[in-house]
Image: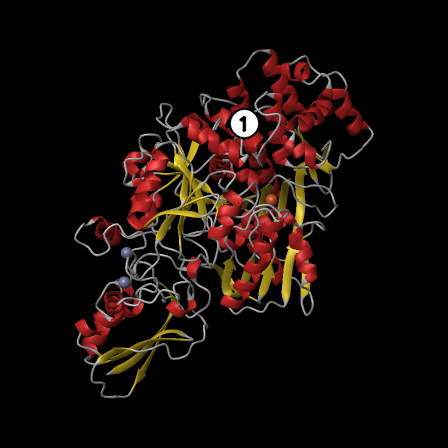
């Protein structure tokens, strides 16, 4: 009996063909395997029983990183093969193959790198077919060494032998190498580019510098990190000062979960995700008593922590450092630096120590950030370890490019039922990020062979992603899509909501261009992929100073207080502190000078944060709201009811009036109710509003499915309270799990909506 099996999915660069070889030979089957345009092709010939076993094991014991999306089997006549061969790639076209993301060092390589007798003892680039770099070094497909940045390293005879031997665990491991033939690290001093030491000595020296409190820029997998000892307050503060990053939380890396438990709570689900081959940064609850520097994440109950994912990180942390800061090596909003010379040029104002290596990073890829929410993870940033694996959709799409939003930008390309989302690009207002964006779009189009005829973009005319869409619109149709509708469609698509099916969409967000040219962000929709109807929204209030009010939440607080009290501001702490500014801001509001109207819930959180005296100026996006959340999480969860609120109903739309909420908050402050209680009560209120508006919509429409999306749902407390209320009320709840609820997930929604437009 002879059959031919064709497998599609992630089957290249994950040790698939060696696995097939071992399986076939162990079952005494003859034939061959090769990579082709369709995927991995296998022909096996032998006894029927053995072939049955082969097919069973093929799926059951496939390598951990393989992901078979389709299997096709055809029966053929006898051929008389003499042995089983691994053949060269027959057709160098890419077709249906997927590219594997980068994979953290595996446990076997971890052992080898610490074994003194191993020839790769302390070699910081050890890898095998189950682990190592993938996406970050791939220039083109198929995934062969020639097409990666490993091309310049010629393997020594030992490495070559491993590479060619099908039973070896480094068989066709494209980044294979050793101290003799592979990449190496160097410790460099700037200015002057003085090479200090190389190899093992360089790592030792870098560790010494870290222990002395120095900052070292270390080249990693998808870019540079700025690293220092996380227990050294002085070092952390110096890093903050030099990076001009006063308070945004810094990411940490620690050797193992045991170490992390010295400063964070790690639950079982969190441990599993930390240890996964994707090795994301995970937000974990801080212990109140911690040996770490307090300036790592001030006014925040969480720390972002990851385990080492390259052998180099692993070796650095094997030195008894409890934890290191591992923040992106960049300036302000620029993308992470990936090249050696660029690093020295740009990061010399922050440090003079550089631990470099000579394996080039081709595709920049930041660390992914997640948080565990209930039963699963929820993305804050989707990049290394996950990109470029596609999101599978419940229907087929045309070939579309969706250009995303402005901040936290990602874009997406679609083909068949797959959506390929880019890695986190960043803030497109930054010139370097924009260059990265344009280059990444080109690369994705090429890698996945997608030639879009439709470009989907935001409605905001000034977003760089919108401009990009129009500038590249020859032979393409450009479709503008409302920001919050795209948020909801993203949630619908990743949850497999079917075509034409309607849902209630709750889009709570910071900013987004509305159909009426106002700034939306507190929206209730009824929608399918074809169109949406706005059923309710937070009352429009002026945003005095426009974008300035986003950085200076006290302005929005004045707007809310004016709306609730008119000119008679209550005598609370806030009024005293801002007595001088209030008339100025009020005149802007009254004369409608640079005060666009907004229904943004994000701004409502900002206003409350400022009224409570928690945050009046934000140094990073969402800071005021995040600190309000942190305050609320410190409160005792007693039997709180939220504040009163009012919903104005007219024929076609409901308006959520915040006046009573603000009055309630002020009254509590006058009665000296603690900030923490007020903050929590505010969260309850918002959750209750969502629940009751959804109920009203359900009564009218009989729609029972609710999708929550938008940046505000990064607030875990709000999501938890809302989710609990909705589920108690019998709603079927959908959250974003596969892509971020913030603007990093919006491109998926844009693509899907564009697909269904006539
Ligand atoms: Zn390995
Ligand atoms: Zn070698
Ligand atoms: Fe948004």
Foreground residue, 51 or 592? Answer: 592
Mark 1 surroundings: few (<14), some (14-19) or many (≥20) residues within 10 A: many
Secondary element type, mark 1: helix
Q: Residue furthest right?
A: 591
Q: Name the quadrant of the N terminus.
A: bottom left
Q: Image check: 203 left or right of 420?
A: left
Say if 697 sits above or below 126 in the image: above
In the picture of the structure, the residue carrying the numbered disc 1 is 628
Give how far across and how far down residue 213 sits, in percent: 39, 31
**Placement of 374 over or under 160, stated as above or below:** above
Residue 558: % across, % down: 70, 24
Residue 651, placed above or below residue 109 = above
Residue 217 sits in which quadrant? top left
Indicate the quadrant containing the C terminus: top left, top right, bottom left or bottom right. Answer: bottom right
State whether label 1 is within 8 Å of ligand 3: no
Q: Residue at x 19, y 76 (%)?
A: 49
Q: Position of residue 564 (x, y in %)?
A: 71, 23
Query: In this view of the protein, can residue 131 be seen by the observer?
Result: yes
Closer to us: 473 or 487: 473
Q: Quadrant of ligand 1?
A: bottom left
Instruction: Count how many numbered circles sit on residues in the image.
Output: 1
Residue at figure coordinates x 55%, y 65% from the top left: 445
Residue 556 lies in quadrant: top right
Residue 318 image point, x, y percent: 27, 41
Q: Is residue 275 above or below residue 447?
A: above
Asked whether residue 144 appears in the rendered view, the answer is no
> Coloring scheme of the render?
secondary structure
Of 612 and 318, nearer the camera is 318
């Amino acid at each position: 009996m002879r059959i031919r099996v064709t497998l599609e999915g992630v089957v290249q660069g994950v040790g698939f063909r060696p696995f097939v070889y071992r399986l076939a030979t162990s079952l005494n089957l003859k034939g061959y395997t090769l990579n082709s345009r369709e995927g991995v092709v296998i022909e096996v010939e032998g006894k029927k029983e053995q072939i049955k076993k082969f097919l069973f094991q093929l799926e059951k014991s496939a390598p951990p990183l393989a992901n078979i999306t389709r299997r096709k089997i055809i029966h053929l006549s006898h051929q008389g093969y003499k042995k089983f061969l691994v053949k060269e790639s027959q057709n160098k076209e890419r077709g249906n193959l997927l590219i594997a993301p980068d994979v953290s060092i595996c446990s076997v390589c971890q052992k080898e790198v610490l074994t003194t007798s191993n020839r790769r003892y302390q070699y910081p680039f050890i890898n095998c077919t189950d682990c190592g770099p993938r996406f970050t070094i791939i220039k083109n497909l198929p995934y062969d060494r020639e097409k990666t940045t490993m091309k310049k390293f010629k393997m020594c005879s030992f490495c070559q032998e491993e590479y060619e031997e099908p039973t070896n665990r480094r068989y066709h491991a494209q980044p294979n190498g050793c101290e003799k033939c592979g990449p190496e690290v160097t410790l460099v001093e700037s200015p002057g580019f003085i090479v200090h030491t190389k190899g093992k000595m360089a790592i030792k020296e870098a560790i010494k510098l870290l222990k002395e409190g120095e900052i070292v820029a270390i080249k990693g997998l998808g870019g540079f990190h700025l690293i220092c000892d996380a227990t050294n307050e002085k070092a952390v503060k110096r890093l903050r000062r030099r990076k001009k990053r006063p308070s945004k939380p810094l990411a940490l890396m620690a050797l193992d979960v045991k170490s992390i438990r010295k400063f964070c709570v790690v639950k079982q689900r969190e441990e599993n995700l930390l240890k996964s081959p994707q090795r994301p940064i995970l937000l974990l609850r801080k212990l109140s008593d911690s040996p770490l520097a307090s300036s790592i994440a001030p006014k925040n109950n969480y720390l972002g922590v990851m385990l080492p994912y390259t052998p180099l990180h692993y070796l650095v942390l094997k030195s008894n450092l409890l934890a290191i800061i591992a923040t992106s090596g960049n300036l302000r909003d620029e993308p992470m630096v990936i090249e050696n010379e660029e690093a020295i040029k740009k990061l010399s104002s922050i440090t003079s120590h550089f631990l470099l290596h000579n394996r080039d990073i081709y595709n920049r890829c930041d660390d992914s950030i997640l948080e565990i929410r209930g039963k699963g993870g929820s993305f804050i940033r989707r990049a290394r370890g996950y990109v470029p694996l596609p999101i599978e959709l419940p229907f087929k799409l045309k070939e579309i490019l969706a250009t995303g939003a402005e901040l936290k930008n990602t874009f997406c390309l679609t083909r068949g039922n797959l959506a390929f989302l880019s890695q986190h690009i960043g803030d497109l207002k930054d010139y370097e990020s924009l260059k990265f964006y344009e280059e990444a779009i080109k690369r994705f189009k090429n890698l996945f062979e997608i030639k879009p005829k439709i470009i989907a973009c935001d409605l905001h005319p000034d977003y760089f992603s919108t401009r990009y869409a129009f500038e590249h619109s020859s032979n393409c149709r450009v479709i503008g899509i409302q920001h919050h509708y795209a948020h909801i469609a993203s949630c619908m698509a990743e949850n497999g909501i079917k075509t034409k099916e309607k849902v209630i969409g709750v889009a709570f967000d910071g900013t987004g261009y509305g159909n009426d040219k106002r700034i939306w962000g507190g929206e209730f929709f009824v929608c399918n992929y074809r169109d949406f109807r706005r059923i309710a929204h937070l009352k429009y209030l002026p945003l005095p100073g426009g974008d300035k009010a986003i950085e200076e939440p006290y302005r929005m607080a004045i707007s809310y207080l004016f709306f609730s009290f008119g000119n008679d501001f209550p005598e609370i702490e806030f009024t005293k502190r801002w007595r001088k500014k209030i008339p100025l801001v009020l005149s802007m509001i009254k004369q409608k000078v640079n005060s666009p109207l907004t229904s943004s819930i994000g701004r409502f959180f900002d206003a409350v944060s400022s009224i409570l005296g928690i945050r009046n100026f934000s140094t990073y996006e969402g800071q005021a709201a995040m600190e309000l959340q942190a305050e609320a999480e410190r409160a005792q969860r007693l039997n709180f009811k939220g504040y009163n609120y009012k919903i104005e109903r007219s024929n076609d739309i409901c308006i959520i009036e915040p006046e009573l909420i603000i009055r309630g908050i002020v009254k509590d402050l006058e009665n000296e109710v603690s900030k923490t209680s007020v903050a929590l009560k505010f969260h309850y209120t918002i959750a209750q509003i969502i629940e009751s508006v959804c109920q009203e919509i359900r009564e009218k429409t009989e729609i029972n499915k609710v999708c929550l999306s938008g940046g505000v749902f990064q607030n875990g407390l709000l999501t938890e309270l809302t989710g609990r209320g909705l589920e108690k009320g019998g709603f079927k709840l959908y959250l974003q799990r596969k892509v971020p609820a913030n603007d990093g997930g919006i491109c998926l929604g844009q693509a899907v909506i564009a697909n269904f437009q006539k």
